[in-house]
Amino acid sequence: MLSRVADSLYWMSRNIERAENNARVLGVQLIQMLEASSEETLARHDWETVLEICGSVEDFNRMYPKMSTNHLIDYLAFAENNPNSILSCIKYARENARTTRDSIPTDLFEVWNNLYLETTEMKISEGSLRDIQQFLNRVKIAALTSHGIVDSMMTRGVPYRFFNVAKWLERGEKTARILNVLNDRSTADREKADGTNYYYWRSALQLVNGYEEYLKQYPPRMNEKDILTFLISDFSFPRSIQYCMDHIRESVISLEGGRVSHYSWRIYAALDLMIDEFDERKISSLKDEGISAFLDDFQNKCNDIGRIFSETYYLVEPSKTT
Amino acid sequence: MFKPYQSDRNFDEMLEKDGSTRAHYQDFHKVMDQFSESELREKHETAQLSFLRQGITFTVYNDNVGTERTMPFDFIPIIMPPETWTMIEKGMKQRVEALNMFLDDIYHNAEIVKDGVVPREFVEQNPYYLKKQVTGIDVPLKNHIFLAGIDLIRDQEGTYRVLEDNLRNPSGMSYVYQNRYVMRQVYPEFFNRHSIHSLEHQLSHMHEAVLDHCPINCLHEPRAVLLTPGMYNSAYYDHVFLAQQMGIELVEGRDLHVRDNIVYVKTIRGMQRVDIIYRRIDDDFLDPQVFNKDSALGVPGLMSAYKKGNVSFLNGVGNGVADDKAMYAFVPEMIRYYLKEDPIIPNVDTYFMRNIEQRKWALENLDQLVVKNVGASGGYDMLIGPHATNEEIDRFRKKIEEEPHQYIAQPTIQLSRAPAFQDGRFYPCHVDLRVFVMRGKKTNVLPGGLSRVALKEGSLVVNSSQGGGGKDTWVLKGGEDNHAEQSS
């Protein structure tokens, strides 16, 4: 497969996943905002949390005069100059699908072409949460439909593996980011009344859509260590970091026909190093103040894997060491 | 609903002069009459939407801002009786054969010029004649024209005439397929009454024809790619479609790399050799070392790989000399010269503005003529005398006097018409037909072709960039009974 096409497939997939994740995060947040309306301080903090998960507080402050619900929604969902806004993700996913049309199922292109066409003509009345939730839902359904198309229609060949590697990288990174941001918040609020922590860790589960699955395995206490273990090292929850990394590794093995060659050993090494870190014991032995550093380190490693993967398959020009 | 109209000035594809339906349209007409107006409107909308959903769009640029548009589709097809098609098919093969011999000739010994059939100045002064770059190159199969798109019109009498040859990068083949596809999806009712030539297998013939152009130094299974300028090109969908259907890779200039006169493509497994390039970028952008230095679309070194016989290009380089509007006038002579045959399908009469007498006559009759810039395409820089204002005519008079060699004039032909259904009503529109000729070891003509229709009422311009639309084109099967076998 052409490197350029592989690159486009990779970014198509990442943007599909990003659109879905950001839509979920924003959707969860909008509902929480209603519930938490009495605890105003909490709600304002929450918005910053969401900004950090799906974009950047700095960018936001540069683009808007003040923090308001409408500005936040605009920034996260619609802003053209925010490359991570949901509309931008839809646009990139569709553009990349367009340049890879000859390698992906026609249905997959059509899902994103339709969503793109619909959203460019979409009218959302200002402040209408109903309209926004409808839009977010539409995005989630499109992403889920894509997974269905890919799963049921694509040959397990190179394009399929690239699509999946990108999806899991994006997803793993997002989970790491959510944990990182919420952990910072929770640490900052640790002195405050009980229940605040509880609130953050429950959020973490909701933001990755893992609340229900968590309750099936753990008692309904929002125990920090349990939640970290679940979201980081659970082998079967499809949004845990462990699960994502395992599947990236599996895909690389398939791409390489089970062999390790001179050009692919680095990606194996990076994945092995990463997987080594998620030992359940390691997580439970972490001290409170160690968690933050652990999550930081972890997010960096995720980024490294993305970079090494791209270099291995010539998706980007290799970074030059100076 | 459909009301027949009198058609005495123009030939009508569907109706006789008195408004009665032509024999080969009668079955179609019967089925059409069974639809109510609201049904037709609904189907019309479904059809337009289907193009948008599938992303079958072209990009139009206005002040550098590109907008994606679909080509409007009209459901009333152009139907062709079998004997008409047989004649067109023969005429097309003949014409493209002669044009190819011409190209091979002028890039070798230029016998046709020595024999005085085509004046030397017309070749030598032609900006698309790449004497220095191309002369002496032996292309595989001696074939310079892998794909030709020949535009045909019908005059008042219904005689088919060639309007234009496109030998560089004719586009639109994907539309032929998509028009048929949408027609089958949205108007299936029409198909069980007709037996028409299918478009299946044509693309596998085309693929075969691509692979026939194995460069001389290629001793392995050749690898073919389609080189596109990218998704912002107006014909991008055409490129995607053809690459996909032929199962060859769609590449951009930045994917290719030339090393030691061998062309490679960058893959996730490293560099791999490329042998045949069906390129959809113009000569001028192909290789910045030889042509336009600023071209970011092309690949440095392509031309030297081509000269060494390490790679072949489809279509050949330098074809523009044969399809420009001035050379057009000599094609009937080329057919006589190379093939010793009379042209099966005639040209439209053409006057050269560089010729003093012809120019003098034309300048006096501009209001009755069509004037074209020999270097322009897509309906740009063109005067349609009978529809023009006095100011426009004066502007063209100046242009012709300033640069006479740039212009030709042709009599205004009453282009044939066919009914169209748009915005809930029927009205007659001018049509033309682009026929696609594919050449490898064998020559194959795509049955039918792309019927283009000028949907602006009264307009003569069928180009999609200027409001033209498309129609499905049916070639009816076989001799004695041209109605469907299945018809009840």
Image: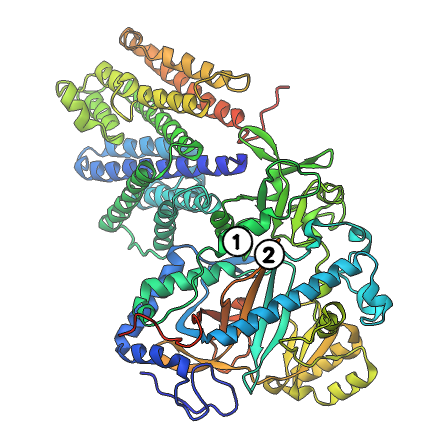
Where residue B279 is drawn, which disc sits there? none
Q: Are marks 2 and 1 in contact (CB under 8 Å)?
A: yes
Q: Which residue is mark 1?
A: B205
Q: Amino acid at mark 2?
A: Lys
- Asked if one can make out residue B353 in the rendered structure from this viewpoint, the answer is yes
**Residue closest to the far right:** B114
Q: How many marks?
A: 2
B461 is higher (above) or lower (below) than B390: above
Which image quadrant for residue B427?
A: bottom left
Dots 2 and 1 on the same chain: yes
Mark 2 or mark 1, whichever is nearer to me: 2
Other residues around mark 2 within 10 Å, as few (<14) / some (14–19) / many (≥20): few
Q: Which residue is mark 2?
A: B442
Which image quadrant for residue B258?
A: top right
The residue nearer to you, when weighing A233 against B436, is B436
In the image, residue B6 lies at what x, y percent? 43, 92
The residue nearer to you, when weighing B75 against B356, is B75
**Residue beneath the point at 31% across and 37% down:** A147
In the image, residue B434 lies at what x, y percent? 55, 68
Where the N terminus of chain B falls, by quadrant? Answer: bottom left
In the image, residue B476 lies at what x, y percent? 43, 72
A60 is higher (above) or lower (below) than B381: above
Other residues around mark 1 within 10 Å, as few (<14) / some (14–19) / many (≥20): some
**Residue beneath the point at 52% across and 79% down:** B459
In the image, residue B101 lies at what x, y percent? 73, 62
Q: Amino acid at mark 1?
A: His
